[in-house]
Amino acid sequence: MNFPVFDLHCDTLSHLLGRNMESYGSLKESDGHISLSRAQKLEGYAQCFAVFTTDLWKDKSPVSPVQAFERQIVQFQREMNNDPQAIAMAYSADDVERNLQNGLMSGILTIEGPAGFDFDPALLQDLSQVGFRMTSLGWNEKNVLTGSNVTGGGLTDQGREYVKEAQKNKMIVDVSHISDEGFWGIMDCAEKPVIASHSNSRAVHNHSRNLTDEMFLALCQTGGLTGINMYTEFLGEKANIETVCDHICHFLELDPTGTHIALGGDLDGCETIPEGMGGIDDYPMIAVALQKRGLEDKMIRNIFWNNALEVMRKCCT
């Protein structure tokens, strides 16, 4: 069972650059979860590529958050330039659809942690012009915008301004990694759909990185969604394809329309993924398992493609 895949989060750019941010690997034949050769096995493919920075690594990394931010942007552009017959940058839902029709993978720039530009809301307009279409407010650290799922702590005034500027400048606001208090702060001030790009169900597996039922329903109310994460730490012990389906099916109990669930694998950013999976090209295994559970092809296609595309259309136009 093969559907086009729209995945809302990966850490492939930092994986290609390596821990020293100087390796400059190639997406064409990467040894990670995502590569162009793996992508060719899919019916179609759009991938959000996170540019990841955090102040937590300031003393451990050979480069500053600013340098890491810049190098990942360069790596992304290098990949677009090296294989224009295989992948193209997408700025909008229309671009993603056009690339699909032309047999191209779509690459979408996103921000995971704004440490690389000092958490400055005033820079979001320029970053939107560069092509960024999604942003979180942090990673696992407490920062000037919000607390995290690790530290706790709510949304600050600067955080509220950040949400406002992001949504004004065609960026989807992403709550993955945020604290519970920060999440509800965003719900209070958001004016467009909000997503959790790579977060699972806390009811299925009790982890602070996952969403409570109330959080998921609040995202639904904004018109947003959650992307199912493939990291076993957030899925549950001895996770396999059926575990992934457990999270999806729990959200379906809360949202029988299935329009607020997508994929956000966290691939190339997680140490272990479900048993039997090797990378992005194994996503069709999830589709087969969902079909065996009784889901119709239309709903599976929505989860794999249409839902994420629709949020991009609402927020990035």
Image (cartoon, rainbow, N blue to C red):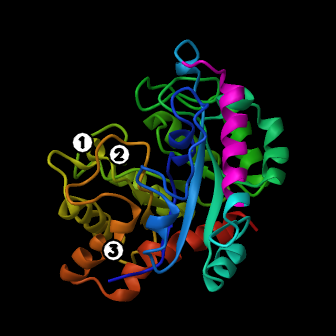
* Badge 3 amino acid: Pro
Q: Is residue 36 left or right of residue 171?
A: left
Q: Nearer the viewer, residue 87 or 180?
A: 87
Q: Give me the C-alpha separation between circle 2 and circle 1.
A: 7 Å
- Contact, mark 2 vs mark 1 (Cβ under 8 Å): yes
Relative image position of residue 162 (x, y in whole percent): 71, 39
Relative image position of residue 25 (x, y in whole percent): 56, 44
Q: Give me the C-alpha separation between circle 1 and circle 3.
A: 27 Å
Element type where label 3 sits in the image: helix
Q: Is residue 93 left or right of residue 200?
A: right
Q: Is residue 289 left or right of residue 16?
A: left
Relative image position of residue 28 (x, y in whole percent): 55, 59
Q: Nearer the viewer, residue 300 or 79?
A: 79
Kindly indicate the quadrant of the structure image that contains residue 114: top right
How crowded is the residue under tag 2: few (<14 C-alpha within 10 Å), some, or many (20+)? many
* Badge 2 amino acid: Asn
Name the residue beneath numbered marker 2: 210
Q: Residue at x 26, y 68 (%)?
A: 249
Element type where label 2 sits in the image: loop
Q: Is residue 239 above or below residue 84?
A: above
Name the residue beneath numbered marker 3: 284
The residue range painted magenta reads 61-80
Name the residue beneath numbered marker 1: 206
How crowded is the residue under tag 3: few (<14 C-alpha within 10 Å), some, or many (20+)? some
Q: Is residue 282 left or right of residue 36?
A: left
* Badge 1 amino acid: Asn
Q: Residue at x 46, y 38 (%)?
A: 177
Q: Is residue 156 above or below residue 193?
A: above
Residue 69 colored magenta?
Answer: yes
